[in-house]
Image: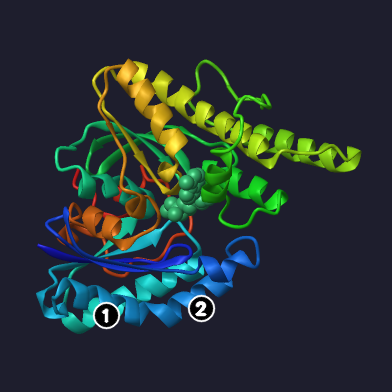
Amino acid sequence: MLILGIETSCDETSASVVKDGTIILSNIISSQIDIHKQFGGVVPEVAARKHIEQILSVVKQALVVANVTLKEIDKIAVTMGPGLIGALLVGLSFAKGLSLTYDIPLVPIHHIAGHIAANYLCHADLKPPFLSLVVSGGHSHIIHVETETTFNIVGQTRDDAAGETFDKIARALNLGYPGGPIIEQLAKKGNKKAILFPMSNLSKQSNDYSFSGLKTSALNLINQFHQKGWPISIEDFVASYQEAIVSTLVYNVKNVLNEYPNEPIVLAGGVACNKALQENMKKMADHMNRLFYYPTPILCTDNAAMIASMGYYVDPCKLKTSEFDAVSSLRIDEWMNHILINEK
Ligand code: KG4
Ligand code: ZN
């Protein structure tokens, strides 16, 4: 089965052709990072306008590189949410147009489910059930993946997402955007024990995250350094800050793994690129005798191959309507009920 994936939820315009849910024939990603850099973050209206400019050529390239025509495509999978509404509408409207013109079934995909499915593209042996830590610019979730389409949230952030926590401090230190990869590079030259940042631990009963205290304490420290004129070692600062984020993420996952004695652990989302996070998760997984998976860097960030892979598992015949809308915030555990006919 050939699936054309389309992803425009944030600042990457992407299209991909994936065979049988696992084989990538093409994965074209046009990033807007250089445009948004000058604003220190993604400007939603600019993002939507850039998607409109890019979408046609990105989809054409995806077909050319895969060496297929639209007539050979069996299904189109498009991100319906969560994401920036104007950005989502570009991909969704384009996909609906293609679906109508070429009479190709269309399935609406949850962005986070796509991030998880990125792992199916890299690891042929990976099958649910497993636990997934999904960490991106907008999300930090621990999800129990029961089947490819059944998700149970067992922990999530109550305020900032992990990627946002990196981005905001990088911005306060004038390091550039996006902050995660810049902080990771600088942290390699720093001492991660130089500053002891607070780690949130909400309660023994909760596996939720909270990063706002960590972020505020880092912002206060930056202000103090500036006000008092103390020299600040950026490398030590960001190495310690990254250490606090990574330790917090790993700590809760370890607690959740105790509740699921056999499940492998699967990393996903933009922050999954982070080597310190990968290494700490691997150490913890080895210690707990669990298999550990993470995607290749290009499949960690937003891309359409992951959307096409997830699309493989959604049956277009079971959709409530073909007139589905983009949704800027949609829980992953409500996605299936939102789009499929209730068969009970
Ligand atoms: O999944 P993604 O591409 O977009 C969203 O769905 O949000 O994630 C983007 C986020 C940004 O916050 C970025 O700073 C972070 O992922 N990120 C990283 C790294 N690469 C990207 N964070 C830490 N270390 C990295 N190497
Ligand atoms: Zn994403």
Q: Nearer the viewer, residue 66 or 254?
A: 66
Asked if residue 136 shows in the view, the reply is no
Work out which quarter of the rendered image holds the C terminus and state it: top left
Is 250 drawn above or below residue 308 in the view shown? above
* Residue on which the image places disc 2: 49
Q: Nearer the viewer, residue 181 or 136?
A: 181
Q: Nearer the viewer, residue 174 or 142?
A: 174
Task: Tell me which amino acid carries mark 1.
Answer: Lys
Is 36 drawn above or below residue 113 in the view shown? below
For label 2, the SS is helix
- Checking the image for residue 60, the label placed there is 1
Is 68 drawn above or below residue 293 in the view shown? below
In percent of width and height, residue 309 lies at 22, 55
In percent of width and height, residue 169 lies at 66, 45
- CB under 8 Å between callouts 2 and 1? no
Residue 225 shown left or right of residue 80 in the figure: right
- Checking the image for residue 139, the label placed there is none
For label 1, the SS is helix
Residue 92 shown left or right of residue 226 in the figure: left
Precedes in sequence: disc 2 or disc 1: 2
**From the viewer's perspective, is the residue at label 2 or at label 1 nearer?**
1
The residue that appears at 19% across and 38% down in the rendered structure is 126
